[in-house]
Image (cartoon, rainbow, N blue to C red):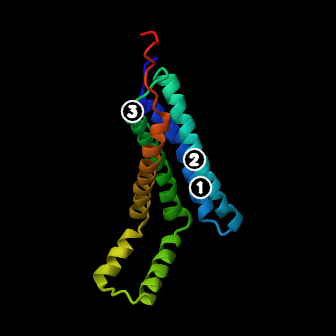
Amino acid sequence: MKQNIVKSAMHGGLILGALFSLNFVLSVTKITALALLTYAIAVFIVVLMYKLSIRFRDNECEGSISYGKSLLYILLTFFYAALISTVIKFIYFQFINTAFLENMFQETMKTMELMKFPMDDASVAQVESMLKPATFSMIYVFTNLIMGTIVGIIMAAFVKKEKNLFSQQ
C-alpha cells in the first residue's frame, strides 16, 4: 500500500482538531464538572494519537515505520488539528464571547499591579495587542505544536517498528 503521510495526517488532524475544539469549549465554561472533563479529553487525545499512529504504520507503511517518519506523522497531525481548533477559537473570541479577551486583559493588568510589575504605555500596548482574537488564537497553534512535539518525541519511540529481516520484499 502506498503511504501518503499528509493525507493520513490531515484525516487524523480533523479528528484531533474536533477534540481540541471540544476541549477548548469545555474549558471556557463556568461549569466545573465540564471544565474537569478537559483532563479526560486530554488523555483521550494522547491515546487516540497513539491509535492513529499505529493505524498509519500498519495500513499505510506496511507494518514498519522509522522513528523519524513516525515523529513527522504525529507532528503533522497535531499541526492540522491546531489549525482547525484555532479557527474555532478565533470564532469564539471574535463573535461568540467578545468580552473574553477584554476580561483577560483587565485581569492581567490587575495581576501586574499586585505584583508591582513596572508597566509603561508600551508594555500595556504590547499586552493589549497580544490579546486580540487573531493573535491570541495563533498563540494556541504554537501551544498545540509544542504539546505535539513533546507527545511525538515520546510516542514515536513506541510506534516505530523496523522491517522484519525475514519478511517478504
In the foreground, 51 or 78: 51
Nearest to N terminus: mark 3 or mark 2: 2
Specify the farthest residue to the top: 168
Q: Are marks 3 and 2 in contact (CB under 8 Å)?
A: no
Q: Which amino acid lies under the numbered mark 1 shown in the image of this protein? A: Asn
Residue placed under numbered mark 3 in the picture: 69
- The answer to which image quadrant residue 47 occupies is top right
User: Any mark on residue 45, and which?
Assistant: 2
Decide which of tag 1 and tag 3 comes sooner along the chain.
Answer: 1
Q: Which residue is drawn at 43% across and 16% down?
A: 165
Residue 111 sits above or below residue 2 on the image: below
For label 3, the SS is helix
The residue under the point 56% across, 63% down is 96
Label 3 sits on what residue type?
Answer: Lys
Q: Position of residue 37 (x, y in %)?
A: 66, 58
Q: How far apart are marks 2 and 1 (CA)?
A: 10 Å
Mark 1 neighbour density, 10 Å: few (under 14) some (14–19) many (20 or more): many
Going from N to C along the chain, the mark reached first, 2 or 1, is: 1
Where on the picture, by quarter, is residue 69?
A: top left
Front-lying residue, 75 or 157:
157
- Amino acid type assigned to the residue bearing label 2 in the image: Ile
Which residue is tagged 1?
23
Q: Which mark is residue 117?
A: none
Residue 169 position within the rendered picture, expressed as x and y whole percent measured from the top left: 41, 10
Q: Residue at x 38, y 75 (%)?
A: 128
Furthest residue toward front: 165
Task: Report which quarter residue 157 is drawn in.
Answer: top left
Task: Name the mark nearer the viewer: 1 or 3.
Answer: 3
Tell me the mark number nearer the camera, choosing from 2 and 1: 2
Q: Is 125 or 119 nearer to us in this picture? A: 119
**Element at badge 1?**
helix
